[in-house]
Amino acid sequence: MSFLSLQALTCKVGAFHLQDISFDVGEGEYFVILGHSGAGKTVILESIAGLHKVGGKLLYNNEDITCKVPEERSVGFVYQDFALFPNLTVEQNIRFASRYKSIEEAESLFEDLVNFLGLEKLLNRRIDNLSGGEKQRIAIARAIFARPKILLLDEPLSAIDPTFRNAIMKFLKDIHRRYGLTTLHVTHNFREASYLADRIAIVMDGCVQQVGSTNEVLSHPASLKVAEFLGFKNIFPASLLGDDSSRLFSIDPNEILVSKEHDINCDFVYEGKLDECMGIVDHFKLFVSVGENQFFVKIMKREHEGCAIDRGEKIVIGFNRKDVCYL
């Protein structure tokens, strides 16, 4: 059963329009909304939080909350810039929700948040001069202290030093599990989505393009538009595979084998011409023309020491049917 359901949701913010946004989020799910900047991801979160007037329906646990005010939605929101109160101390920021609602077991929850998030030494400090990571932890603590049923995270890693990105991603997953949350996380980063998400919605130009499990969406895009957004390479007409349909296919550059001889045992084998070979740290990038199509191939240096193939030289490439992704 759906815990949160967006049904044909529409919203206009200035000149921007959300159009027919529909997807379901299960209870306890970590759901990622993935898309370019300006795609409408934050507007979706703000609509769920009740910050915009919307069309369509928004259901929480089968209850229609489309017209409910934000305070009645049991939603915690962590903005990209954290939106902490600079005139309050760290402790006052965390406890802010107690000013307008009764918090169940407030003291034990506060103590657990402070200990788990490592905020003990910061409680009496003002927000100014705190690091991005510290502000992020405080903003998350403030959101969870309100005991939300749904946690909304708007680009939570954008202000974090890339050096700590992996640790913060694990930290977010730990928080999600520890406090039994249903989390919606907005990002443009495929790596974040891949690690964190149970399911993903791809949003482009105010529209949902695809919804599914993490593996399904990232490995099997539903359209050429989604495939290009996800950075898929080697997109060619399926006629190259002997398919007489009008479909397209893609093949991962890492799944293509290369040889100077006709000794590749693959479902699809082609003779081509090497256009370029670029050495990049631990691998080579090869660009191989097969007729009018140019394949991009990645091979590990340790497997092809020296890459003794010259530009313009004939080369054989091959790949297997199981690795083909039809679009």
Image (tube, rainbow, N blue to C red):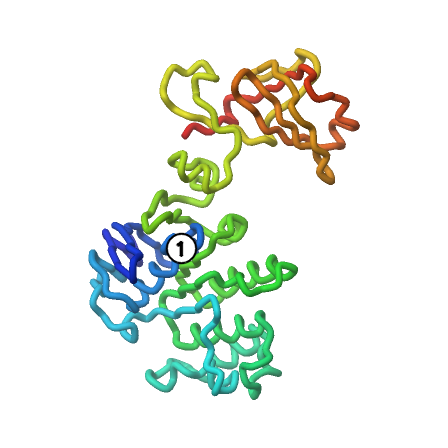
Residue 161, x across and y down, in percent: 62, 63
The answer to which image quadrant residue 75 occupies is bottom left
Q: Residue at x 58, y 15 (%)?
A: 270
Q: Please, is residue 158 above or below residue 125 in the view?
A: above
The answer to which image quadrant residue 64 occupies is bottom left
Crowdedness of circle 1 by 10 Å Cα count: few (<14), some, many (20+)? few
Residue in front for this viewpoint, 177 or 295: 295
Q: Residue at x 34, y 65 (%)?
A: 46
Q: Residue furthest top?
A: 262
Residue in front for this viewpoint, 244 or 193: 244
> Disc 1 on helix, strand or loop?
loop
- In screen coordinates, is 314 left or right of 226? right
Residue 194, x across and y down, in percent: 51, 48
Residue 187, x across and y down, in percent: 46, 55
Q: Please, is residue 225 above or below residue 65 in the view?
A: above
Q: Amino acid under label 1?
A: Gly
Q: Residue at x 23, y 61 (%)?
A: 54
Image quarter where the C terminus lies is: top left
Residue 125, x across and y down, in percent: 57, 86
Q: Which residue is mark 1?
A: 38
Q: Please, is residue 200 above or below residue 80 in the view?
A: above
Residue in front for this viewpoint, 203 or 111: 203
